[in-house]
Amino acid sequence: MSIGATRLCVSKLSTARTVLFTLVLVACVTIPNWLKAQAGQSTTGSSQPGDLRPTYPGEPFNNPPVETTVGPVKLRLYGTILLNLSFSDSPEVGEDVPIWPSPAPTVTLANGTSKTASSIHDTIFTLRQSVLGFVLNPANAPANGWTPSAEVEFDFFGNTPIDADLSEDRVLNQPRLRKAFFRLRKGNFDLVAGQDNIVISPLDPVSLSHVAIPLGYSAGDLFGWLPQVRVDYNHSFGKTGALFQFGVLRPAFGDPRLGDQPTAGLTLQQASPGFGERSGQPFYQARLALSHPMQNSAAIIGVGAHYGEELVGGTPQNVNSWAVTMDFRIPVLSRLVFRGEASPAATLFLLVAASCRVSPRSPQRPAILVQGRRSL
């Protein structure tokens, strides 16, 4: 077991919260290993080259991993038990994942009375963003032929039941599937089928307060876990590696302006396919990335392209979607990495792995966020 992190973001705190801030800051200084974990690529896991390994935020950075051999396969368990505590002196938009203070000047309470926003103090405790998963690799890689492996990962950010007994404050957080895919590897080729990150936007711009929903998602980051069939080709030029990926993905558009969102109150899939599925075409995505050793890790720069269609309008017509993207990962120091993504339709996301990531908020709305993580 390894302790991953305890950290906070704070502004204009009361005396009691200042004391709490100081205590957690001391914990951050005395437990610095999480910095290296965030900044680097994992070297843990099986010694066999080419084994499938989990990725951050679910990936543990302990060595050796929690792994055992079951018949012909190696079963690796991993996960992050994440407790988020959020204290604020204003109502927040996004309860378990605080995004920004509510712009409304007043808040209407359940009894019909109103209070000013400045008199509301939200306190949130949640474990819903904990991540659990497992990876299967062959116990003995075959000398030739295709080598199979698989990964399944989920969190607890599924639906919260709403019924007549909700007032009893039961905690019934449902598991949510994040990834579930099967991989076949032979030489430089990988064939991947299942649910995984979309091809053109491989980075996961998360902080410990934004694991279930990536930190940059509401600002335009092109992120998603989508069912897909993908081909990966790896090639080396000395120390420099090249990766080319091409995949077809589920055409899930979900544009609220076009009316293809599920009706409020539905608990199952909507009655008919969305406009993306109606187009009769999947998403097409491709990406080319170059990597080179740097600071005992790897510097990576990639470019991607997307094309899709949806069938919309009273008089059906095809509307095209497209994107050109760039992503990069530059390890400046052993514990400092610059990661980012950009596209013509999105803001550039620059993440510093060794920094304290602050959620967008008004300077007049102070808050303290305390976070702890334990990895398997």
Image (spheres, grey):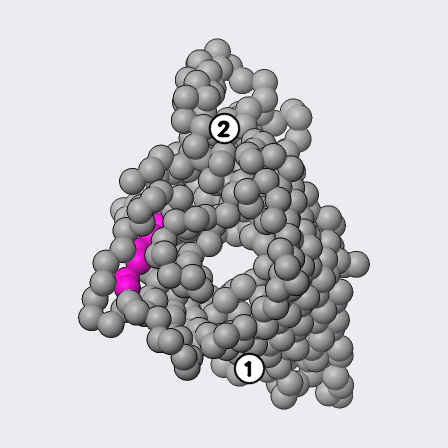
Element under disc 2 = strand
Query: Which region of the structure is painted magenta?
Result: 74-79
Q: Which residue is mark 1?
A: 273
Quadrant, the N terminus: top left
Q: Name the residue at 23% across, 58% down.
A: 68
Task: Give the number of marks.
Answer: 2
Magenta-drawn stretch contains 356 = no
Task: Give the x, y percent position of residue 134.
Answer: 33, 60
Mark 1 or mark 2, whichever is nearer to me: 2
Comes first in the chain, label 1 or label 2: 2
Any mark on residue 197, and which? none
Task: Give the x, y percent position of residue 299.
Answer: 64, 49
Q: Name the residue at 71% across, 75% down.
A: 307
Q: Which residue is mark 2?
A: 8
Task: Give the x, y percent position of residue 114.
Answer: 53, 34
> Residue 114: in sight, yes or no?
no
> Residue 151: in sight, yes or no?
yes
Q: Residue furthest right?
A: 344
Question: How busy is the neighbourhood of tag 1: few (under 14 within 10 Å), some, or many (20 plus)?
Answer: few
Name the side, left or right, on which 227 lies relative to 153: right
Q: Amino acid at mark 2?
A: Leu
Name the side, left or right, on which 290 lies relative to 145: right
**Depth order, front residue of 119/136:** 136
Q: Are marks 1 and 2 in contact (CB under 8 Å)?
A: no
Element under disc 1 = loop
Q: Is residue 142 above or below residue 238?
A: below
